[in-house]
Amino acid sequence: MEKGKSVVSDYTEYRPHGENLVFMREFADDISSSEVFFAETVRALGYLGGVVRPTRADLRLSCAYNDTWVQTDEAHPSKRYWEILEHAVPETTEFGILGPPAASVRVDVLTDKVLCDVYRQALAGATCPEGYFVMFDQVWLGGFETRVVDVNESASGGKFPVTLWGDDLVLDTYTADDGATWLCVPPEDFPAYPPVTFGIDYDTVPLLTLAVHWSRWMEKGTGEHELLQSALDALIADGWVSTMTPTYFRV
């Protein structure tokens, strides 16, 4: 497509300051186990999965005081994090302060159920010193694919145009078995975030941070915005509470 055509620049625009949404979830003090706690938290992937889908995850663990959900920096588990990757995703080659993962697990599709299965394996292989137990600290998610709803002539044929700081770029899309169109994971050298990203942390309560970076997912009246709003409605119905007042969404 010719650079500068209005149909390209009007289709979607990258907005670096976008919209950040933060949700928290409280649980009963008598929740039965760390596994149940984790499963209740990562169920969020199922609600968001029709809009934005990660293809990789780092599951990071910590130690918490026995009989509490209070984490400590005084002790660390023997195996601090696991890497979960869909088959086409390359393994990490540069490691952070935690070093290499205890294990890299390959899966067909990254889902909340898959995360729960890996968490169960991680709990079986990690230990904390006496007086502490192992629980999750963070689910870092990456390699995001994003659902495209309002596909017009500018986003057909496996391509998707976006305006980035005045430049018109074209990214790849694919069609799933159910007919839905998905924006592929942007290439490593793409100088911007994908349309929507999210992650889960634990800080006395689970926190879900979702960021929206591209215009079509922010603007009311688009299919992308409506689909994301429906996903947020489902999150809220499941007990997630917004910690801030958004500009573009109803929470």
Image: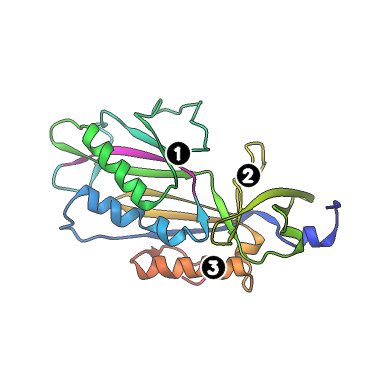
Near-viewer residue (211 or 2): 2
Near-viewer residue (1 or 37): 1
Residue 102: mark in rendering: none
Q: Which is nearer the N-term, disc 3 or disc 2?
A: 2
State yes or no: discs 3 and 1 in contact (Cβ < 8 Å): no
158 with respect to 51 (left or right): right
Number of marks = 3
Of the residues shown, which amino acid type is indicated by label 3?
Leu
- Select label 3 or label 1 by which is in front: 1
Q: Check disc 2 and report its element: helix, strand or loop.
A: loop
Quarter of image, res 102: top left
Using the rendered image of the protein, determine whether residue 180 is visible from the camera's viewpoint.
yes
Residue that carries the numbered disc 2 in the rendered image? 186
Q: Which is nearer the N-term, disc 3 or disc 1?
A: 1
Residue appearing at x 17%, y 48% in the figure: 68
Q: What stretch is highlighted in magenta?
A: 54-65
Please tell me whether residue 61 belongs to the stretch shown in magenta.
yes
User: Where does residue 113 sit, x and y in percent of width and height?
Assistant: 34, 51
Of the residues shown, which amino acid type is indicated by label 1?
Leu
Residue that carries the numbered disc 3 in the rendered image? 227
The outermost residue toward the front is 177
Quarter of image, res 175: bottom right
Q: Check disc 1 and report its element: helix, strand or loop.
A: strand
Vertical order, 198 against 239 (above or below):
above
User: Where does residue 210 sit, x and y in percent of width and height?
Assistant: 49, 56
Q: Residues within 10 Å of mark 1 (few under 14, many from 20)?
A: many
Of the residues shown, which amino acid type is indicated by label 2?
Pro
